[in-house]
Image: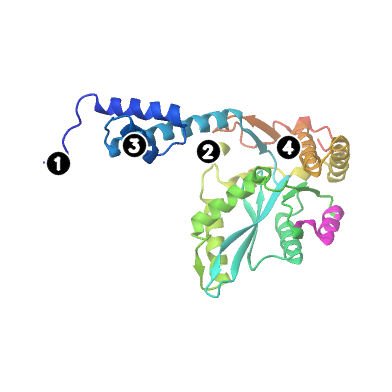
Amino acid sequence: MGRPRLPSGERQRVRDLVQRERLLQGRTVGVPAILAALARNGERASRMLVEQELRAFKRADRAAQRRLFERRRVGREILARDAVWGEDTTHLGRLVSGQSVDGELIKDLGTLETVGLSVGGPPLSEDLIRLLSQTAEDRGGWPLVWLGDMASINRDARLRALLDSERVVHLLSRVHTPTDNAATEHQHGEVKREAQLGKGVVLASAEQARERAEAARRVLDHGRLRATRGWRTAAELGRALPRADALVDREAFFRAACSAMEKATRGATTKREAQKARREAVFALLEQLGLQRTHVGLRPRVRPGPTACSAHADRVQCPGARP
């Protein structure tokens, strides 16, 4: 009863054939091309075995690529509350009428909390200004740095004037470069998966999307334990970490960041190079002041000490910095 047992050595024979064809036809070759090559050479093999062995080779290739990427990946860890906020818009679903429902999320990159959230139609610049202002009021102050993409609402003159008046460094992501705001993109994915929102979801109303997103936000902020943060929740980190503007003087930081960005862009020949140079200059300043540390490779799973910034406060060197 059941499927006959494979002859001894048959799987290894098929594996060798598949490996040979991958060398001859390329690593991305598919099953039909391999079977055609075997038939041309007068060789026989079970299609099921060819599929299984090809799948195993491609799985091993992907794992090797992930390991290589992890060894080379450069990650930034923000070490204070309200030092850097990331903001972006994401698609949550559509109403029965076909109208898009979008969510605007603001993430504190230090505590990993979703500190701002709004849901509705495609946001306008006044919507973003309102959300940022409300978030700053809820958090007890503005961040030192705000990250956003190149959307027109993020380049609005009224928004730029507001950020300048609050002494917030405004950094825009490069076009088609999601890694420039990867932490916020990751937050989108977490919230949408938890709330069961996103592409293809049909909603009765925008309010339904808002309720789902808010529920997901509470679970992720107050319930989800973070391995890279010593298995603490985002809310616990929010209570433990000091505010960034309690460690450095906001005005001094703003002036130092503007000066560093201006110097960094002097040799840039394209807008994209200039954007990258500005970002690197600001993050280098954060690192110098102990508000950030850089990890190369896999992120440590446990962070020493009850508070992230306590061991770094004595490194603050910005003019006008607070001890």
Instruction: Kindly tell me whether residue 128 is visible in this rendering.
Output: yes
Magenta-highlighted stretch: main secondary structure?
helix
- In the drawing, what numbered circle is on residue 291? 4
Helix, strand or loop for disc 1: loop
Query: x, y (%) of residue 53?
Result: 34, 33
**Amino acid bearing label 4:** Leu
225 lies above or below 314: below
Tell me the mark number nearer the camera, choosing from 4 and 1: 1
Q: Which segment is the magenta one?
A: 154-165
**Percent x, y for residue 32?**
37, 41
In the image, taking residue 181 as reference, residue 57 lies left or right, namely left
Residue 100's x, y, as percent?
Answer: 59, 67
Residue under the image location 34 percent in, 27 percent down: 17
> Is 25 in front, or is 262?
25
Query: Is residue 239 visible to us here?
Result: no
Which amino acid type corresponds to the residue marked 1 in the rendered image?
Answer: Gly
Q: Mark 2 points at which residue?
A: 227
Left or right of residue 252, residue 58 in this image: left
| First in sequence: mark 1 vs mark 3 | 1
> Farthest residue toward the left?
1
Q: Mark 1 points at which residue?
A: 2
- The residue tagged with tag 3: helix, strand or loop? helix
